[in-house]
Amino acid sequence: MEIFVARQPIFNKKKKIFGYELLFRDSMINFVPEIDGDIATSKLLSNSFFTIGLEALTGGRKAFINYTQNLLLKGIPLMFPRENIVIEILEDVEPTEEIISICRTIHKKGYTIALDDFLYSSKMHPLMELADIIKIDLKTVPKGEMKEYLKPIVRYKAKLLAEKVETYAEFKEMKALGFEYFQGYFFCKPEIIRGKDIPGSQLTLLRIMSEANKTEIDFNGIEKMIEHDIAISYKLLRYINSAFFRRTRDISSIKQALVFMGEKEIRRFVSMVAVTNLAEGKPNELIVTSCIRAKFCELVGGISNEGIDTSELFTLGLFSLIDAILDQPMKEIMKELPLTQNIRDTLVSGDGAMAKYLHLAEHYERGEWNQVFKFSSMIGPIEEQLPTLFMEACDWSYNFTNL
């Protein structure tokens, strides 16, 4: 049986990745009823550590995992390495003497404890004393009342984590109130400043991508462009000599690499490097997410029966966050990029033949399983293969972004 695991990123104040909360689903069948929490967490732990491998899911960052009252009492968190996980105590866990005792043991052994979806009450004081992180859902506290709400909470040593941060304005507001960590998809949205132009250096990179995505590639032009950029040359040779390419000997020149790669792989590589350079100063998770979407869309297209161009799907996923990277409206950016009409229509309006592939990727990464079921059903009988494809996309993305 395949196990569906999604990840929600958690950032620090500098918009650097601190960890991921892992979200679980055991199938795309009967997705409406709630899965028993004990079963969900047990399967998640088993598959994350023993089947999938935690590294592929989190890239070496902390994994935030929910624990029910029953699993805590059984001491299940102590079965796993403290360096890798954050123990999330669910909001419905009652702070009984037994729970407080086991949490003291967990705390003394050096595990990180987080109180999930925290709602303040005096009975929570014993757990608050043991907690390293307190997670507060922004949707549960009325707007404008957060400062007052935090007064009895900030007396404790625990760091504050804001959940469901959906805009940069919310990120900045919660940061000013003393929150250390931030969970949500604010980083996927542009900070649009009226009257701001795309800088010349970024326009150059956009034109490089445009050149690489032309119907007929000028190989000599691309070769010169890469040879004159040490950083791109280095990345290209590391990429072509990585485990993703099977060769009998290493490749040592730009020309060799280009000939070996062929047009499709050249387009992909140049686009990825350019997008990475464009995102300087932005959360690295933007690039990771863009690459995961690109590879996931391509892989899903490869198993569908629609005969769709998988290289177009890759480009679609890769450029799906370009508005957040450049802090510009997608419509304006598309004027600078001669991508196919299909890609432009999908990125600007969310419509078109390829839109369902991008929507599937977006909902999968958030763990919105009912929407995953909806869009995967539109593509074909592919549900059972999605977990494998998503893990492959994650693994591929981390390998590329760590070049």
Image (tube, grey):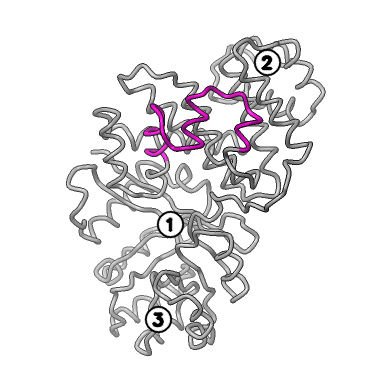
Of helix, strand and loop, which one carries label 1? strand
- Mark 1 nearby-residue class (10 Å; few <14, some 14–19, many ≥20): many
For badge 3, the amino acid type reads Leu
What segment is highlighted magenta in the picture?
Answer: 332-361
Quadrant including the C terminus: top right
* In this view, 181 is above or below 151: above
Closer to the camera, 338 or 269?
Answer: 338
For badge 1, the amino acid type reads Glu
Task: Provide the residue designation for mark 2.
Answer: 251
Q: Disc 3 and disc 2: Cα gap in Å? A: 57 Å
Task: Provide the residue designation for mark 3.
Answer: 127
Type of secondary structure dominating the magenta stretch: helix
- Mark 3 nearby-residue class (10 Å; few <14, some 14–19, many ≥20): many
The residue sitting at 35% across, 62% down in the picture is 66
Task: Verify CB contact (< 8 Å) between mark 1 and mark 2.
Answer: no
The residue sitting at 70% across, 11% down in the picture is 218
For marks 1 and 2, the one nearer the N-term is 1
Residue 352 placement (x, y as % from top left): 41, 29
Q: Disc 1 and disc 3: Cα gap in Å? A: 20 Å
Q: Please tell me whether mark 1 or mark 2 is closer to you in this view.
A: 1
What label does residue 269 carry, if any? none
Of helix, strand and loop, which one carries label 2? loop
Give the side of residue 383 with respect to residue 11, left or right. Answer: left
Residue 121 placement (x, y as % from top left): 37, 86
* In this view, 13 is above or below 260: below
